[in-house]
Image (spheres, helix red, strand yellow):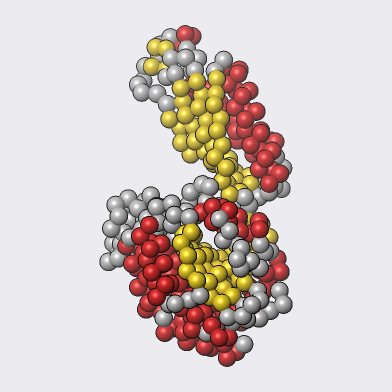
Amino acid sequence: MADIKSKIKKLAEKYSKEIIDLRRKIHRNPELSFEEYETSKLVYEKLSKLKIDRVQRVSQTGVVGLIKNKNGKCVGLRADMDALPIHEKTGLPFASKNHGVMHACGHDAHTSMLYGAALILNEIKAELNGSVKLIFQPAEEKNPGGASILIKQGVLENPKVNAIFGQHVMVDKPAGSLGFCEGVTFASQDELYITIYGRQSHGAKPHKSIDPIVTASGVVMALQTIVSRNTSPYDPIVITIGAIHGGTATNIIPSEVKLMGTIRTLNENLRKKSLKLIERTIKGITQAAGAKYKFEISPGYPELNNDSKLTDFARKAAVDFSGSKNVFKSERIMGAEDFAFYLKKKPGTFYRIGAGRTSDIHTQTINIDEKTLPVGAGFMAYLAVKYLNSNQ
Ligand code: NI
């Protein structure tokens, strides 16, 4: 394996410029979730030029490639390709030229690193002990998540994927360092849409109204008691109301108020239970006020559960590839990630790759250190080779 490791490292260096160039090109041309037409076309064309065993377009804006040497195991490697509705303020020469859209979550880096891994794996194909499926998926940032759609379209079949790996950049960790966390690592995520219907009146005649603003305020406060009083303090849950809209003037009590929010949990039971508790709370508060309500849930992603054996396997591979000083234990977070859908079907792990000191993901000024990219490409390729040679 020492030989293949140094070979992969050399190839990562050889393709470093190509990987960085692709990242810059994608960064300059970001596209929103489910609209990755140009990005997926670019990936499709680049993979087609490599003459790998198979390149397919899936869904509207996904691309799946296959590099196959022998019959045997198949390992899935995944990257996401979508950008966010954020106006970029990095001032970079390759900053977004699509107004109000930005690669602020590093998916440009994920895509170029997976492409880099494909370049490397294709060159050492004769040494592969099985096949590698390259999954370039759309829409990680938007429900129901590109992963759930690709799985329904059979991305984990033909050949059947035995295990799957994915990576995500992590700011404020040294560029190219690798972080692992076994078990539940990301939270489940569902979107909440609540409308409270009252009765309009003059602001000076509140007794003639059913005030949806006062009622909505009660709902917002009461929802927090689900976190503090109805669920166990040992079982984390977040309920955030992120938007509240209603009313037009100082002296009019409006007829309705709309609330939007998100709920995060770390297990399916709590997820189901708390959605019921949310509705019960809204119902109780609105009934007490004489108001009516509509409650809609947009189901998001389940909790992300990293397989403990394969997480340990990947962590050891990282120590082997980069040295233990470049490997860290990553923390569990209440963010969500649609890679969780793959892990509901197949064992695998979703690990983090340090992107250097910069502002946080989902901000206008994030600027990842490009030294991350060849390491991410090389390690992904190494992990795939190692997995195919293992008895995991
Ligand atoms: Ni992301």
In front of the other: 376 or 243: 376
Q: Quadrant of residue 361?
A: bottom left
Q: Is residue 377 left or right of residue 90?
A: right
Quadrant of the image for the N terminus? bottom right
Q: Is residue 330 visible?
A: no
Using the image as rendered, state which of residue 95 and residue 112 is in the foreground.
112
Q: Quadrant of residue 318?
A: bottom right
Residue 336 rendering spot, x and y as whole percentages: 56, 52
Residue 332 drawn at (x, y percent): 62, 58
Q: What residue is rendered at 66% in x and 50% in y?
A: 266
Q: Which residue appears farthest toward the bottom when viewing the image? A: 3
In the picture, measured across the screen, residue 307 lies left or right of residue 61, that is right
Q: Quadrant of the C terminus?
A: bottom right
Residue 71 as seen in the image, left or right of residue 115: right
- In the displayed structure, 195 sits above or below 110; it is above
Q: Identify which residue is drawn at 41% across, 79% down.
A: 16
